[in-house]
Amino acid sequence: MYRTPASNRLHIGIFGKRNTGKSSLINALTGQDTAIVSEVAGTTTDPVYKAMEILPIGPCMLIDTAGIDDEGVLGEERVKRTLVVLRKTDVGLIVVEPDTLIDSFEEDLIKVFRSKKLPFLFVINKSEVPGDNAQVYLEKNQLPFIKVSSKTKQGIEELKKEIIGLAPGHWSPIPLVGDIINPKDVVILVCPIDSAMPQGRLILPQVQVMRDCLDNNAVVLVTKETELLDCLKALKEKPRLVITDSQVFEDVRDTLPADIPLTSFSTVFARHKGDLNAYIRGVYALEELKDGDEILIAEACTHHVQPEDIGRSKIPTWLWNYTRKELHYEVTAGGDFPDDLSRYKLVISCGGCMVNRAEIMHRIKKAQDAAVAITNYGVLMAYLSGILERIIEPFKVGLVKLDMEFDKAARK
């Protein structure tokens, strides 16, 4: 269970005022002393992420947040960080006490949840304590709630069932490749080894795709781009699919016969974590770039920057070679993502393997709301290599029709 990537877990955000028992509720859900509990209001200062398996829900990421009524300058900053958690949340729990007077703090949360179409549930904690203010308000306003006691464990199992009931409507991960391959199919993974590759291991997207192939009873072969031709010659029949790292598109394109389906790890994750159609539409913004335009490179994780870093070095070089425009770049990493995107002409997102789909979809919606084009590494590199049509072919059902005039321009 602990090997399940954090990005593939159901993210349960736990919100509420200070000292309503949010941390105690996490301990009751997990059956462990996972979160620090204190009678002092404001014990939880920053969002705390805890990967757990909660039966019968499965692998989850519980997010314990600071009180939404925290005070002072530091308190305001903590509240901001709490609200950022909403970008990652799949199911929200708003914790109140029986005698809580529900006011603008909770009401603002309700508005945010509804605007983001996120399922949420009020949890009246400390049900062993007298009071009915919260229940009266929730019943009057027809808001979903459940009564529990973190102390006596009353209602905890019922709460787990409620979470399961909320989750499927929002959190339904799109397969990696399991829906486009069959048992016994041969799938080749092309994994180049360069200075950015971690010593002695593969990167997470490669491992996850490999595991998905194995889970679907496919035969997986792993090779570098320099040995791809030898790998193909060793097979009696053509592989069902070749999945490559985007950075060696041109090498693989020149080696692989045109009748063998090809895609990339980044394209797989564009569909799995985000909106492949949005990325396809967004890539055509390259044709409209002008000198001085600002480009946002949005990485979803933090890592040690290598000389061959894709976002900071390779993409700017490729775009200069393609556009011959003096473009300005800004790179954000980890949880950082600008609130105001209006000054950017294009947002280029990484594959998002280290974050959940809710976070990536938040970024896509922010771009769309600002009328800013957004694409991702894999789609961008396929377009620049003139093989966009080919690498999305395996996922053609439900995809937008390519603008072939622009696609022809990309091939020149």
Image (cartoon, helix red, strand yellow):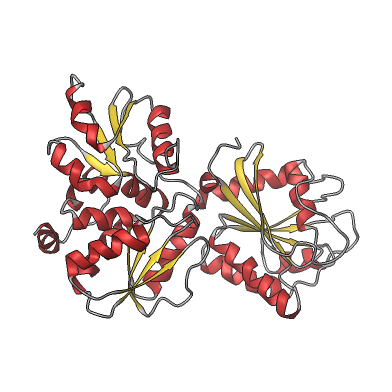
Asked whether residue 149 appears in the rendered view, the answer is yes
Q: In which quarter of the image is the N terminus?
A: top right
Q: Which residue is drawn at 52% across and 63% down?
A: 117
Horizontal side, residue 349 vs residue 99: left or right:
left
Quarter of the image where one finds residue 297:
bottom left
Q: Quadrant of the C terminus?
A: bottom left
Quarter of the image where one finds residue 259:
top left
Residue at the farthest right position: 130
| 311 over 4 or under it: above or below | below
Horizontal side, residue 230 vs residue 220: left or right:
left
Residue at the farthest top position: 236
Q: Position of residue 390 (x, y in %)?
A: 18, 46
Q: Position of residue 338 (x, y in %)?
A: 47, 73
| 270 over 142 or under it: above or below | above
Frontmost residue, 143 versus 268: 268
Q: Residue at x 74, y 73 (%)?
A: 69
Q: Where is residue 240 in the image (x, y as percent from the top left)?
A: 24, 30
**Count of labels shown?**
0
Q: Position of residue 225 (x, y in %)?
A: 25, 37
Asked whether residue 396 appears in the rendered view, the answer is no
Frontmost residue, 288 versus 156: 288
Quarter of the image where one finds residue 211:
top left
